[in-house]
Image (tube, helix red, strand yellow):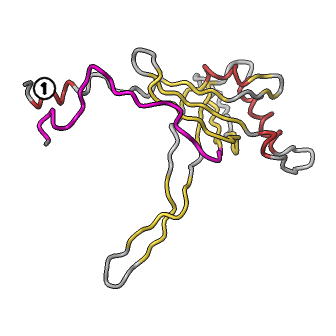
Amino acid sequence: MPSPIKTFFNSFTDVAKPSRFEVTIGPKTYNNISSSELILRCETAELPSRTYATAEQKFGSNPVEKFPYQVQFNDLNLTFIVDDDMLAKYFFDGWLEAVVPSSNYNPNYKNTYSTTINIRQYKNNNEPSYSVDLFEAYPISVNQLDLDWSAEGHHKLTVVFAYTSWQKTSTYRKSQNINRRFFDIGFE
């Protein structure tokens, strides 16, 4: 039997890397720019969170307990690298215009501007390991791009998305080469 310490260290040989991901924005076209043109431009993303709104309740002399009453989905931030033609800026400006047109400031129906966003995490061998779909997603904020005579970097456009819900679209498959059960490393 291998030593518990060696088994513990060997369990960290294949760790998920945050740089191995892909974001796909379900088919949308604004200002003659397709969302498919932005797939390789997403520099930072987040896997979505799910939290519960809770209410506190006290029964008799027992401690105060929290009880969930509503699921909450936090907004999602995606950051895109902007090319010299400013395609990402034009695309998201057009999408914001589709949500609430500046000609009359009357919001359109959600089904006309929302879409599904897929975020996929990849293993080191380029196989997908985790994937989620965000349903009825749309931008609620397109952050500013700062201009600076002394800056030498590139523009990064952060877009904040609201969505109705998310669902895991991948299936967990345990890796065949690593046994991660606690009793194998001495924690029975």
Q: Quadrant of the C terminus?
A: top left
Residue drawn where x is 92% and y is 49% of the image: 104
Residue 27, relative to residue 98: is it above or below?
above
- The one nearer the camera, 4 or 91, is 4
Q: Quadrant of the N terminus?
A: top left
User: In screen coordinates, is 122 left or right of 146?
Assistant: left
Residue drawn where x is 74% and y is 40% of the image: 114
Residue 146 position by quadrant: top right
- Residue under numbered circle 1: 6
Residue 62 picture location, percent across and down: 31, 79
Residue 42 picture location, percent across and down: 59, 26
Q: Residue furthest top?
A: 125
- The one nearer the camera, 176 or 98, is 176
Q: Which three-letter amino acid code belongs to the residue tagged 1?
A: Lys
Q: How many marks?
A: 1
Residue 140, relative to residue 28: is it above or below?
below
Query: Bounds of the magenta span?
Result: 162-187
Q: Residue furthest right?
A: 103
Q: Is residue 99 magenta?
A: no
Residue 35 picture location, percent across and down: 71, 25
Residue drawn where x is 73% and y is 27% of the image: 27
